[in-house]
Image: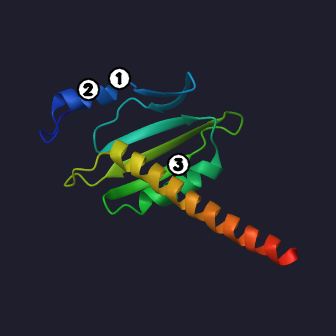
Amino acid sequence: MSNNGDTPMEELEDYEKGEELLLDGTKKLVILPGASSHAASFQIEKEDHTLGNALRYFVNKNSDVEFCGYTIPHPSETKMNIRIQTWEDTKTTAVDALRKGLIDMMEACDVISEKFTEARDEFDAKQS
């Protein structure tokens, strides 16, 4: 991998090692080879379009993100690949953008859950 001089080579080398995130001892997320600090592809195990489309939406809402897209490599495999590129003139890395997208999505899910619970409880109270 070439270094354009903006990112320390040690940081780039960390991305080349194929970092993994384990969830309950099982590999959940891998940074695919060829990544740099501002452009990376991630493979997420046991996920499909449900997470892919929502995560793509939340990552793209970040103004530091230049591009985000996802693909399901093959319908018979339970893998989702997501590619994130951030603007090189920002300090936001592709990993930072993924993390922010996941956090934003979880926060939105919390709001939806709260609103649903309130509406359900209000409906149930009217039925009694």
What colour scheme was applied to this rendering of the protein? Answer: rainbow
Q: Is residue 123 above or below residue 10?
A: below
Within 10 Å of disc 1 (Cα), the crowding (few <14, some 14-19, many 20+) is: some
Q: Residue 117: name its quadrant.
A: bottom right
User: Which quadrant would the C terminus be assigned to in this image?
Assistant: bottom right
Q: Secondary structure at mark 1?
A: loop
* Callout 2 amino acid: Glu
- The dot on residue 13 is 2
Q: Position of residue 39 (x, y in %)?
A: 33, 44
Query: Could you tell me how far apart the alpha carbons at marks 1 and 2 are, in whole angstroms?
Result: 7 Å
Mark 3 or mark 2: whose residue is earlier in sequence: 2
Q: How many marks?
A: 3
* Callout 3 amino acid: Tyr
Camera-nearest residue between 78 and 121: 121
Q: Position of residue 76 (x, y in %)?
A: 72, 34
Residue drawn at 53 percent across, 53 percent down: 106
Query: Could you tell me how far apart the alpha carbons at marks 3 and 2 are, in whole angstroms?
Result: 24 Å
Q: Is residue 108 left or right of residue 61?
A: right
Q: Position of residue 92 (x, y in %)?
A: 27, 50
Q: Residue 89: name its quadrant.
A: bottom left
Q: Which residue is mark 3?
A: 70
Q: Which residue is mark 1?
A: 17
- The dot on residue 117 is none
Q: Residue furthest right?
A: 128
Q: Secondary structure at mark 2?
A: helix
